[in-house]
Amino acid sequence: MRLTRLVFFLCLSLATTPVWAASPGDVVARWPSPGKTSTGLAFDGARIWLADHGVDQLIAIDAKTGKELKRLKSPGYRPAGLAYDGEQLWCVDVLEAKLYRIQPDTGLVSRVIPSPVKVPRGLAFDGHALWVSDDATRSLHRVDPEDGTTLAELPFPGRSVDGLAYDGRYLWVSDRLSDKLHVLDPERGEVLHSLPSPGPHPTGLAFDGKRILVVDYQQDSIAVVSREGEDFALREKPRRARVTFIHQLRNFGPDALPDVDVYLALPKDLQSQKIHGKPEFVPTEFARKQDRWGQAVAHFHFDDLKAGKSATVRMAVELTAWQVRWIIWPEQVKPLSRLPAEVRRVYLVDDSKYDIHNPIIREAAEKAVGKERNPYWMARRIYRHIHQSMHYEMVGGWDVAPKVLARGSGSCSEYSFVFIAMCRAMGIPARYAGSLVVRRDDASYDDVYHRWVEIYLPGYGWVPVDPSRGDKDTEAGRAEGFGLLEHNFLITTQGGGGSAFLGWNYNANEDYTCAGRCKVDVEGIAEWEPVSTHK
C-alpha cells in the first residue's frame, strides 16, 4: 500500500468553503444524500462514497458539486462503515461480519477478512490499520488489514458508535444517541471534546483533509463540518435570567455583635456571561474593595447587632449566561516555559489549603503526570488521577488538599483544592471560580453553590476544569468536565487562594465580633427567575 497517496488525498479539500471564517463544528456546506438509507462514508481524494443498506450499493458523488457519479454493488447485504486506505475502499458488512476491500473503479473485491468483532458497524483507516466498532461489546478495535487481527481495543467513548473517521491524528466518532461528534485520542483512549452533531441521526463520517463529512440517516443529507477555526471558545445556548442573592446573618444572642462586616463577591462580564446594567443592592450604601487576586467585593458594615436582630444584604443581577465549549488541540498548546511572567508569579504559589510541597501532593502529582510534558496532557492526567482516587461526598468543612486526597472523598471545593495543588506542584497555573447555580428548572433556588478550577494553558489562556465531574461512566462524559462550562451559573468569584475579604469562601463572607456570648447563624440563598427577551 502506498501511503504517499494517502498523504496526498488528505491534503485535498472540498471546493464549497464559504468566504467567512468558520468555527469548529460549523456546517460550511450541505448536500442531499443520493440514498435514503445511508450508513457508511469515505473520501478518496475526489469522490465521496456512501454505503446504502437499503439498496445494497456503494454510491460515489463528486466532492466539489455533490453530483452522483457512479454506483457499485455492495459485496454484502447490510453494508455499514466505509473507509479508504489510499488505494481502495473498505466496507464492513453487519450481516456477514466481514471486511471487504474493494477496487473503486471496477467494484471488484480484492480481499475479504473476517470481522474480529460480532456486530461491526463503524469503520476508519488510520494510515496503517483499520478501526472497527462492535455494538455487541461496545468497543473499538484497531485491526490488521491483512488478516483481521485485533491490535488494540478501546471502550466506546460515548453512548453509541455509528460512524468513524481518522483525521491524521484523532478518531472522530458519531454518536446518534447523544447527537454528538466525539474527538478521541486513539493512543490515550481519551476524548478531547465533543461537538454537536449537524443532524439528529449521524451515521457515516469521513475526513476530506481539512473538514469532517457527516451523513445523516434522518435528514438524508451530507454535512461538511469545520474542524478548526479562529474561535476556540464556542458560545451557545444563551440563558437570560435575574438572580437575587440574599445573605443573612442572625444573632440569637444573648449578647450583641458590636461589629458585623458582610462581603459579597461582585460578578463581571466573562466569556460565559454578560451582566446587564448594574447590580442592585440592599442596603444601597456599601464600599467597593478588591483583594490580591483582583476580585471585587461589596463591603457592608453593621454596628451593634443586638440579640434577635439580623444583618441582611441583597444583590440582584440580570445576566445572559452561555454554555461555552473550549476546543483545545493539545499539539497547539505551548510549553510551560511560555507562561506569562505575571501568571507564573501569582498562580503557582502555595497557600494554606493547597500545601503543594506536602509529600502526598508531590508524589500523587508526579505519579499522575509521569514523563508527560505537554501542559494539556499533564492536566488531563491529574484530572484522571483524581477521579480514579476520589469520590464525591459532602461531609462539611473544607479540609486541606493532602488530607482530602488521602481520605479519597470531598466536596466540589475540596476537589478543587486537590486539583489546584497538584497542578501547581507540576508548574501548571491554576485558580478557582465560584458561582450561584440554577438547579434544573429556570425558576429555582440555590443554597449549595458550586466551585471549580481554571488552568492556564499557554497559547489558549484560562480554561475551566471541573474535577468533581470526572467520575462519569464514559470517556465523553468525563471529558465534559474539562473545557466545558454550562449555562447554569452566575460566576461571582475568581480567586487564587485565601482572600482578605472572602477568606476561602466564594459568593459571600462575613466577619463579626461578639460582646460576650453569641449564637450566630448565617444563611445564603440565590433565587433564579427566567427573563423573557421577547417584547
Image (cartoon, grey):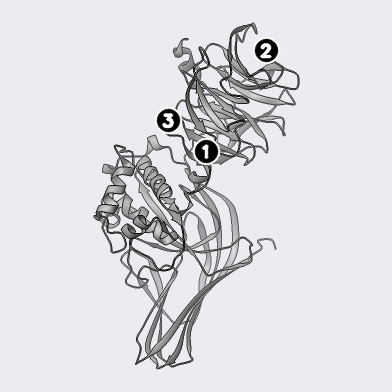
Return the disc, 1 or 2, that comes first in the chain's sequence.
1
Image coordinates of residue 165 in percent, x first then y, are 54, 27
SS for callout 1? loop
- In 3D space, how far apart are the residues under numbered discs 1 and 2 (Cα atoms)? 36 Å
Residue 124 versus residue 512 in the image, above or below: above
Q: Looking at the image, which is closer to me, 520 or 227? A: 520
Image coordinates of residue 190 in percent, x first then y, are 46, 37
Image coordinates of residue 158 in percent, x first then y, are 56, 39
- Quadrant of the image occupied by residue 54: top right
Q: Looking at the image, which is closer to me, 150 or 225? A: 150
Label 3 is placed on what type of residue?
Glu
Res 395 label: none
SS for callout 3? loop
Q: Which residue is mark 3?
A: 187
Q: Residue at image x 26%, y 57%?
A: 349
Image coordinates of residue 182 in percent, x first then y, are 54, 37
Q: Is residue 171 visible?
A: yes
SS for callout 2? loop
Residue 448 versus residue 15 in the image, above or below: below
Q: Is residue 137 left or right of residue 269?
A: right
Q: Which residue is mark 1?
A: 24
- In 3D space, how far apart are the residues under numbered discs 2 and 3 (Cα atoms)? 32 Å
Disc 2 packing (10 Å; few <14; some 14–19; many ≥20): many
- Quadrant of the image occupied by residue 431: bottom left
Q: How many marks?
A: 3
Q: Is residue 440 left or right of residue 361?
A: right
